[in-house]
Structures are given as C-alpha cells and as structure tokens.
Image (cartoon, rainbow, N blue to C red):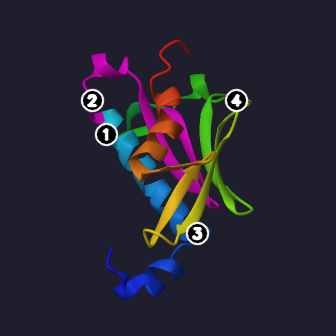
C-alpha cells in the first residue's frame, strides 16, 4: 500500500473490523467446502450462523419440507461445533474443549497494514481461516 492513506487503514485496524474479515473468510470457506463433491467431503455439510456477534459452524443436513429444500443443523452432531468470537483484544476460535486459536490484530508500521497474528506469527487471512476450519471440516473420524 502507498503511504498516502495510512491513517484510514490504521483507523480501521480494529478488533471489530478484523472480526468481520475473519468471519467473511470463514463463511466463504464453509461454502466452498459444501460445494465439493460429496465424496471429497465425506458426505458432510456445514452451516454457519452469527448470533449475538459469535460465529458458529455446525454440521448440517439438507431437509425438504413445506419451506422447500434447505440446510439445518444436524441434530445428531449437536455437541460438535466451532465458535469464533471476540474476547478482549483478540479473536478466539474454539471447538468445544480443544485448545483455542487466538488471533490478534496488530498494526504493522513497516508495511502500513493490519496483520493478523496467530501466536507470534503474522498470517494472511486465508491462512487464519485454514487454521480455524481445517481440523473441523476434515475431521472425518468424528
């Protein structure tokens, strides 16, 4: 980025704007997963929903009823879900009792960008989404 508009970029380096970006990336990746051929996704589908500022990803199933064909949360997998939420100055992604992924937005004065750090490492947005989703989407054992 050129240094001309660093003030606007810096002002937008907030937890809320970064959460929106992470949420958007995760939702898009869930949609991409659901579009895979059934054999590549082991027949699984996922549903993402934001309720009260917390993104939840759940196993889903297609149903056909009086409202047409739609996806709903799979009741057989109600105890297995992934949440992404803001907590203090960080974004936390967690699947039940597993170790949380902590994402911290940080302003980078050298590159004039707002970087997402997982641990001590800056990560591009696609990589953050991969770290959040891969163990959940591709855990064919559960």
Look at 47% across and 16% down and name the residue there: 140
Tag on residue 98? 4
Look at 41% across and 24% down and name the residue there: 44
Q: Position of residue 66 (x, y in %)?
A: 38, 42
**Marks 1 and 3, the one that precedes in the sequence:** 3
Measure the alpha-carbon separation of dots 1 and 3: 24 Å
**Marks 2 and 3, the one that precedes in the sequence:** 3
Asked if the residue at tag 3 contacts the one at tag 2, i.e. Cβ–Cβ closer than 8 Å, the answer is no
**Residue under label 1:** 32
Measure the alpha-carbon separation of dots 4 and 2: 27 Å
Q: Position of residue 9 (x, y in %)?
A: 45, 78
Asked if the residue at tag 1 contacts the one at tag 2, i.e. Cβ–Cβ closer than 8 Å, the answer is yes
Instruction: Label 3, secondary structure: give it.
Output: helix
Q: Position of residue 110 (x, y in %)?
A: 47, 69
Is residue 48 on the magenta stretch?
A: yes
Q: Position of residue 42 (x, y in %)?
A: 37, 17
Q: Nearer the viewer, mark 4 or mark 2?
A: 4
Bounds of the magenta span? 35-59
Q: Nearer the viewer, mark 1 or mark 4?
A: 4
**Residue under label 2:** 36
**Residue under label 3:** 16
Instruction: Label 2, secondary structure: give it.
Output: loop
Q: Nearer the viewer, mark 1 or mark 3?
A: 3
């Amino acid at each position: 980025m050129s240094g001309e508009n660093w003030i606007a970029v810096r002002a937008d380096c907030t937890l809320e704007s970064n959460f929106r970006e992470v949420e958007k990336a995760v939702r898009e990746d869930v949609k991409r997963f659901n579009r895979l051929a059934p054999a590549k996704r082991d027949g699984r589908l996922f549903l993402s929903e934001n309720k009260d500022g917390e993104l939840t990803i759940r196993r889903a199933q297609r149903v056909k009823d009086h409202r047409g064909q739609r996806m709903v949360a799979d009741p057989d997998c109600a105890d297995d879900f992934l949440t992404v939420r803001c907590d203090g100055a960080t974004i936390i992604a967690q699947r039940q009792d597993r170790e949380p992924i902590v994402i911290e937005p940080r302003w980078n004065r050298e590159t004039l960008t707002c970087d997402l750090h997982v641990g001590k490492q800056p990560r591009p947005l696609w990589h953050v989404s991969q770290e959040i989703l891969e163990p959940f989407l591709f855990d064919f054992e559960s």
